[in-house]
Image (cartoon, rainbow, N blue to C red):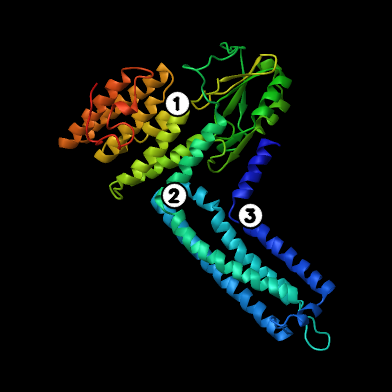
């Protein structure tokens, strides 16, 4: 399927109105179906049931009217509670987190249940007739009462679900799990002790290139790689991308370059522009760094003077560490992509371990270095990530980040807190100096779990 169309469909499915709309249509269809069943089967079967009293026209209208009115009232309450929860989440955790709440299935299914029950009752209510030509859809009324019972159960679930969904550990956990899951699905596991060499990826210099301007202004949400590679093969050019998912582009500015320029045609430009999906906001589907930015934003807000919640920052650091270990142990794709004949066709810089460390730990450095609890945990998490590094380049990235953190902590802290953080930073740098495979979490009481000893003790070996 076309990547742009696929992205649009994902946006529709993730919208707040999609599931309630589908449930509303199903309720209308169910109402029509149950009326048809009542017309075909009649209500003679009820007379043989001693434990069930047949409902008459006035009673059926009263029951359905009561259920329909109650559902509208409850749906309004549910919508109001949802808005309050969204406002709280936006102010406490940041507006970017609203993407997770808007796509929360619990909230949308709850609202859809009440709307569907209301519409079903209206569909059945309009068919009830009294007098000589009376018609009371007994089956449909029974189903309406069952839907009312189900709606009460959904309301109880919703009351439990709302505080659970805005609990900070659950918010951070959902983002962190998606980050780890997407990293595993997107990048293959690294086999062996080093990073695999690129197959036939020489330095590519095909000559003068033709710039390709962006057609729209906004954030790149996805790139159709297969269509892009097919276009490069058809035009017999090398396409060099200047942006990746999550970057902001402006209409008319250079989006990519195609070389050699004499093979590039105007019709190719429009097709290349269609390979990019541009929107008003970043999305996590093809932008792993968006998930990282969400965790960093929550941690930065938690460490701000107005909030002063280092434990929340510690939770975010734990999940950033989990994502870092996935990046450290997985092979990142090479920038040069080839066709089946081995000819270079696309040059695109992918996410790398250094890029992840900078976006995750580098951007939290100034906030974590000013709080002793966050600073000690920052060093601990970075040490755990370093223990999974597979190359000397990855260790160098960690060493550089740890040195910058130590320097910033010296300027931000003083007294016993400064000495404690400095000792921990020295111990980490001593472990990093051992190189790949030189860090073992079991060798220190502060690196890894706390079951082996007191985290405050430092063991220099």
Asked where in the image residue 237 lies, by quadrant, the reply is top right
Which residue in the protein does label 3 denote? 18
Residue toward you, 324 or 459: 459
Q: Are marks 1 and 2 in contact (CB under 8 Å)?
A: no
Identity of the residue drawn at 35% across and 17% down: 435
- In the displayed structure, does residue 128 sit left or right of residue 83? right
Circle on res. 170:
2
**SS for tag 2?**
helix
Q: Looking at this view, is 343 or 252 the one in front?
A: 343
Does residue 94 appear anywhere in the picture? no
Q: Residues within 10 Å of mark 1 (few under 14, many from 20)?
A: many
- 3 or 2: tag closer to the N-terminus: 3
Measured in 3D between alpha carbons, the distance from the residue under mark 3 to the one under mark 2, in whole angstroms, is: 24 Å
Report the residue at 80% width, 88% height from top: 131
Q: Position of residue 118 (x, y in %)?
A: 64, 70
- The mark nearer the N terminus, 1 or 2, is 2
Seen from the viewer's position, the closer of residues 451 and 128 is 451
From the viewer's perspective, is 58 left or right of 112?
A: right
Is 182 placed above or below 236 here? below
Q: Nearer the viewer, residue 255 or 56?
A: 56
Q: Say which of marks 3 and 1 sits in front.
A: 1
- Which is more foreground, mark 3 or mark 2? 2
Marks 3 and 1, how far apart in space? Answer: 38 Å
Mark 3 Cα-neighbour bin, 10 Å: few <14, some 14–19, many ≥20: some
Residue 199 x, y percent position in the rendering: 59, 13
Q: Quadrant of the C terminus?
A: top left
Among the two numbered marks 3 and 1 on one chain, the one whose residue lies closer to the N terminus: 3
Point 32% across, 34% down: residue: 378
Helix, strand or loop status at disc 1: helix
What residue is shown with label 1?
328
Label 3 SS: helix
Q: Position of residue 361 (x, y in %)?
A: 37, 32
């Amino acid at each position: 399927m076309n990547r742009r169309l696929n992205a649009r469909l994902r946006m529709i499915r993730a919208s707040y109105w999609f599931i309630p709309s589908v449930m509303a249509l199903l309720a209308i269809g169910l109402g029509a179906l149950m009326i048809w069943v009542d017309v075909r089967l009649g209500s003679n079967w009820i007379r043989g049931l001693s434990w069930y009293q047949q409902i008459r026209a006035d009673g059926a209208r009263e029951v359905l009217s009561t259920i329909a009115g109650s559902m509208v009232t409850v749906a309004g309450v549910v919508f109001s509670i949802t808005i309050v929860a969204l406002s709280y989440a936006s102010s406490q955790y940041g507006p970017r987190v609203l993407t997770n709440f808007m796509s929360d299935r619990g909230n949308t299914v709850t609202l859809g249940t009440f709307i569907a029950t209301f519409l079903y009752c209206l569909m059945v209510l309009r068919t009830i007739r009294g007098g000589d030509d009376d018609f009371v859809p007994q089956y449909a009324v029974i189903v309406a009462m069952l839907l009312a019972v189900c709606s009460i159960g959904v309301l109880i679930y919703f009351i439990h679900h709302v505080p659970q969904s805005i609990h900070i550990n659950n918010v951070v956990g959902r983002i962190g799990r998606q980050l780890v899951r997407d990293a595993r699905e997107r990048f293959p596991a690294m086999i062996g002790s080093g990073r695999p060499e690129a197959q036939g990826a020489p330095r590519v210099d095909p000559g003068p290139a033709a710039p390709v301007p962006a057609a729209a202004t906004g954030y790149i949400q996805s790139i159709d790689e297969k269509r892009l590679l097919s276009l490069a093969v058809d035009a017999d050019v090398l396409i060099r991308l200047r942006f990746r998912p999550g970057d902001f582009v402006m209409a008319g500015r250079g989006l990519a370059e195609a070389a050699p320029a004499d093979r590039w045609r105007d019709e190719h430009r429009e097709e290349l522009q269609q390979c990019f999906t541009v929107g008003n906001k970043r999305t996590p589907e093809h932008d792993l760094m968006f998930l990282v930015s969400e965790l960093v934003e929550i941690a930065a807000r938690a460490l701000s003077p107005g909030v002063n919640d280092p434990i929340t920052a510690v939770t975010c650091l734990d999940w950033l560490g989990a994502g870092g270990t996935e990046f450290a142990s997985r092979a990142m794709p090479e920038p040069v992509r080839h066709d089946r004949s081995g000819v270079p066709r696309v040059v695109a810089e992918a996410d790398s371990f250094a890029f992840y460390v900078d976006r995750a730990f580098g951007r939290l450095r100034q906030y974590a270095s000013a709080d002793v609890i966050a600073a000690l945990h920052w060093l601990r998490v970075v040490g755990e990530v370093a223990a999974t590094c597979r190359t000397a380049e990855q260790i160098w990235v960690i060493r550089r980040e740890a040195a910058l953190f130590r320097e910033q902590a010296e300027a931000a802290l003083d007294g016993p807190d400064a000495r404690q953080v400095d000792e921990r930073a020295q111990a980490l740098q001593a472990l990093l100096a051992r190189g790949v495979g030189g860090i073992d979490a079991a060798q220190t009481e502060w690196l890894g779990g706390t079951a082996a000893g007191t985290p405050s003790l430092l063991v220099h070996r």
